[in-house]
Amino acid sequence: MRKYTFLLYLLCCTLAMQAQMVWHNPLSEDTARVQGRGWNMELKDNYHRMPDRLKPVMRDAVWQLSTNSAGLHIDFYSNAPEIVVRYTVSGNKTLPNLTTIAVSGLDLYATDCHGVTDWCACPGNYSFGQATADTITFHYKGLTYHNQHRLGSEYRLFLPLYNTVTWLEIGTPEGSVFKWSPLSTERPIVAYGTSIAQGASASRPAMAWTNILQRRLDTPIYNMGFSGNAWMDEAVFDALSEIDARMYILDCMPNMYRWKEDIYSRTIAGVTKLRQKSEAPILLVENDGYMYGHTNPSIAEEAKVTNEELHKAYEALLKQGVKNLHYLTMEEIGLTPDAQVDGWHASDVGMEQYAAAYMEKITDILDLHPLTDYTAVRQRREPATYEWNERHEAVLQRHRTTQPDVLMIGNSIMHYWAGEPSHRIHRNVEAWNRLFEGLTVTNMGFGWDRIENVLWRIQHGELEGVNPKHICLMIGTNNISIGEKSEKIARGIVELTEAIRRRQPQAYIHVLKVFPRKDKYADVKAVNQLLTQMLRTDERTDLIDLTPVLTLPSGQIDPTLYGTDGLHPAAKGYEKVAQALQNIVK
């Protein structure tokens, strides 16, 4: 009787929510609104990590594990004060060495319009039901604190690590805004590994080291962890080679002791397979070690043997001339005695240590270093004139199909001039077209951008796949707006120029001094004077001062060349800018 009463209660709750909620299905779109996996166009009707066509070539165990949703997440905007997620899974909801939330639960994070990210908990407001087939419900309440943007916060919903999601809907109250975030088209870091990579034994989905890394690097990470089955199979390497990766991580050694005689040959074969398709960096990772190996020599020997074989393969590949091959040692991972739950699988402490080791290595390999005074960050979502992330994706898409001769990098002064990707504001299309006649140009101006936002963009793919002859950089006025010191801004522009140069060694880089602006004359002049002193110019790097073009003999801005804000040029001002740049970008 108690069971039927409970089921009736659940039914009543469900009907009540249906009457109040609008439900959104990530699989109802032409392309699944699921992030963190390859083959998304093929995976239209499920939450798997591999397409069905790979099933015949995979071992059964690998295939079944690939249906688990480890590393997958769903991103959306909403200003809803509460969010309900309901879904079903096909497997057991618990495992001996993981929490139920890690195996079958969710994790929700919110980033507000100021760029502040918080974890959304729902203590006591979730239910896993009584049986395997029962609907699981997570109910997040009180989500109003940071919702100051018209679209509210941007949410990231991490899916279960060790179960197969068969159906899922996200509910928001009637009248609330709900909008899917753009699907990321950045090239991902692909992590092939064991149960530890899949997420054992994190306490909740977002605490798997791949998801920690994804959040800290703010870049796509594809979790290709297969619990107990990272055997470096040829079929898996074939599948990995289909992904246009920014970097591959091969972290299989904890599963390879039973195949210790084959580690050398399988590593050589796997790396060779990837190199046939990709020049992306490949990171070979040693066995992290077993913490009870300090009191059990035989288990410590397993890690030693696998790591010796992996290192032999690494040295052999280097001798063969394989480029962009890297190595992470057990000592660099640096697990401590509290880092494992059972002598094998990482606790949250271990996951944090894993992520920290990977962060340090990946930062060096992919040149993701901060500047002296600036760390790369996305722009905040405070301006309501456009969606910053959507424009970033538009630039990435353009550079996959179009080879530009010129890149114009900057803030709103550049953004609202003209060009592609287009914006509804075009302040002087004719001047733009005359300046760039016969040239293909990408407008990489983003309204409200500061130095740190441009750094994020170039570290997240906007300079990949292109080979421009000219790059114009105009940035810094928005850093002046928030009162930053002139020395910091000038140094930031110089170091940003150097970061661009490392990625585009062939280009002529033209750094435009900060445009004069009303009520900020002294600040602009101080930054520009420091740029003259600090920027090292050569035959491929120059510093361009358009101040004389835009000001009167008195040094004040020419009001006929500016809009009412005294910051953005008017149509006539853009005409003057185009004339001044005419002989520079040809």
Image (cartoon, rainbow, N blue to C red):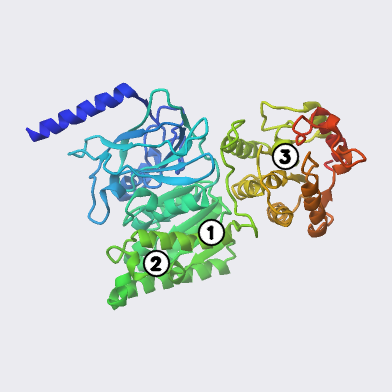
Question: Residue tagged by mark 2?
Answer: 287
Of the residues shown, which amino acid type is indicated by label 3? Pro
Q: Residues within 10 Å of mark 1 (few under 14, many from 20)?
A: many
User: Horizontally, is 30 left or right of 289 in the view?
Assistant: right
Q: Position of residue 564 (x, y in %)?
A: 76, 29
Sequence-first tag of 2 and 1: 2
Q: CA distance from mark 1 to mark 3?
A: 29 Å
Q: Which corner quadrant of the image does residue 562 belong to?
A: top right
User: Horizontally, is 583 left or right of 451 in the view?
Assistant: right
Of the residues shown, which amino acid type is indicated by label 2? Asn
Marks counted in the figure total: 3
Of the residues shown, which amino acid type is indicated by label 1? Ile
Which of 339/133 is in front? 339
The residue lying furthest to the right in this view is 553
Q: Position of residue 331 (x, y in %)?
A: 44, 72
Q: CA distance from mark 2 to mark 3?
A: 44 Å
Report helix, strand or loop for mark 1.
helix
Can residue 235 be spotted in the picture? no
Residue at x-position 73% and y-position 57%: 487
Question: Residue tagged by mark 1?
Answer: 362
Q: Residues within 10 Å of mark 2 (few under 14, many from 20)?
A: many
Residue at x-position 86% and y-position 38%: 550
Q: Position of residue 263 (x, y in %)?
A: 41, 65
Which of 576/278 is in front? 576
Question: Residue tagged by mark 3?
Answer: 404
Q: Quadrant of the N terminus?
A: top left
Which of 50/186 is in front? 186
Q: Residues within 10 Å of mark 3 (few under 14, many from 20)?
A: some
Q: Nearer the viewer, mark 1 or mark 3?
A: 1
Q: Position of residue 25 (x, y in %)?
A: 38, 29
Report helix, strand or loop for mark 2.
loop
Q: Which corner quadrant of the image does residue 260 belong to?
A: bottom left
